[in-house]
Image (spheres, rainbow, N blue to C red):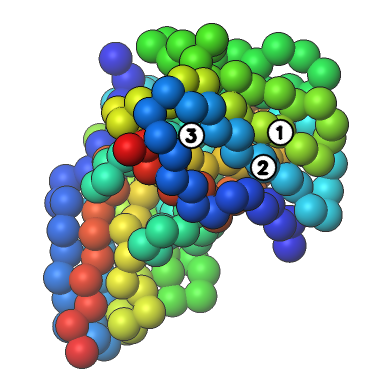
């Protein structure tokens, strides 16, 4: 089946630094990738949708200048948390899909645990 | 706004018993539903899905029931095993939103040996 990886799996950083998280589709070309954030004991909340070669679409309340998304190739999307603060500590999960069409399956990555000190 | 939610935050069952996890949704336009299993520290894992033109779908040890009248779906797990212990999420989609998913709040299933 389709495999999506994330790197790193865990990261600890100091407040004020930037952290980059990679999401890769290993065996298929993902035109569309989604980025979710999940706080402890809560559900997945969609942050943004990225389409290869175009600007990401951010959900209401998500700062695009703080959460930079780049989807430069059909197998890689990156999320950069800029000037991270403790409240950004969360579990970040990406998913990848062949397209954004209705019914197209999202394949989820294993998540990245971010801890900002 | 529109949301997908769950009735029970935690469900504890005895190994071997059947489990039923419920989900309510409010978006009447929702026509595609998915159940995911998430183990601690991992990403969601697809379990089973159902479209609105069906009211029941069965997989291996799992069954999803959809009641569009009351906007409710459930996940039934037969002969629950310790490996089924996880958080279960329902998610919904509709063709106005492409393949975007809205996730429910999640239910933690605890299986007692």
Marks 1/2 same chain: yes
Front position in the image: A29 or A114 = A114
* Chain containing mark 3: A
Relative to A31, is A57 above or below? above
Q: Which residue is mark 1?
A: A77
Q: Name the residue: 15% across, 51% down.
A: B8
Work out whether mark 3 precedes mark 1 in sequence or the reverse, and give the earlier one.
3
Q: Nearer the viewer, residue A26 or A80?
A: A80
B100 or B59, nearer to the observer: B100
Q: Which mark is residue A36?
A: 3
Earlier along the polypeptide chain: callout 1 or callout 2?
Answer: 2
Residue at image coords 43%, 52%: B35
Residue matched to label 2: A23
- Asked if both marks, 2 and 3, belong to the same chain, the answer given is yes
Q: Alpha-carbon distance for marks 3 and 1?
A: 13 Å
Disc 1 on helix, strand or loop?
Answer: strand
Question: Would you identify the image quadrant in which residue B77 lies?
Answer: bottom left
Q: Quadrant of the C terminus of chain B?
A: bottom left
Which-is-in-front pick, marks 2 and 3?
2
Locate residue A31 relative to residue B59 in the image: left or right. Answer: right
Q: Residue at x 24, y 47 (%)?
A: A41
Position of the N terminus of chain B, as image quadrant, is top left
On screen, residue A73 versus residue A49, left or right, reads: right
Disc 3 residue crowd, few under 14, some 14–19, many 20+, Cα 10 Å: some
Q: In this view of the protein, which residue sits in the foreground, A31 or A66?
A: A66
Q: Position of residue A104 (x, y in %)?
A: 69, 38
């Amino acid at each position: 089946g389709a495999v999506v990886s994330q790197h790193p799996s865990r990261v600890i950083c100091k407040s004020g630094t930037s952290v980059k998280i990679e999401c890769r589709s290993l065996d298929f070309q993902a035109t569309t990738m989604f980025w979710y954030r999940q706080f402890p004991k809560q559900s997945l909340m969609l942050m943004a949708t990225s389409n290869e070669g175009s600007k990401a679409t951010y959900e209401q309340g998500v700062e695009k200048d703080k959460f930079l998304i780049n989807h430069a190739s059909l197998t890689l999307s990156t999320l950069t948390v800029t000037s991270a603060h403790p409240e950004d500590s969360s579990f970040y999960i990406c998913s990848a899909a062949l397209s954004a069409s209705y019914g197209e399956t999202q394949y989820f990555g294993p998540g990245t645990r971010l801890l900002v000190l | 706004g529109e949301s997908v939610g769950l009735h029970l935050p935690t469900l504890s069952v005895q190994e071997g018993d059947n489990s039923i996890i419920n989900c309510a949704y409010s978006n009447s336009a929702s026509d595609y539903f998915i159940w995911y299993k998430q183990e601690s520290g991992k990403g969601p894992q697809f379990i089973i899905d159902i479209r609105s033109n069906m009211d029941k779908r069965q997989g291996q040890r799992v069954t999803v029931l959809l009641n569009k009248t009351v906007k409710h779906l459930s996940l039934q797990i037969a002969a629950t095993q310790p490996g089924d212990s996880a958080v279960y999420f329902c998610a919904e989609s509709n063709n106005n939103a492409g393949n975007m998913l809205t996730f429910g709040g999640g239910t933690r299933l605890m299986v007692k040996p």
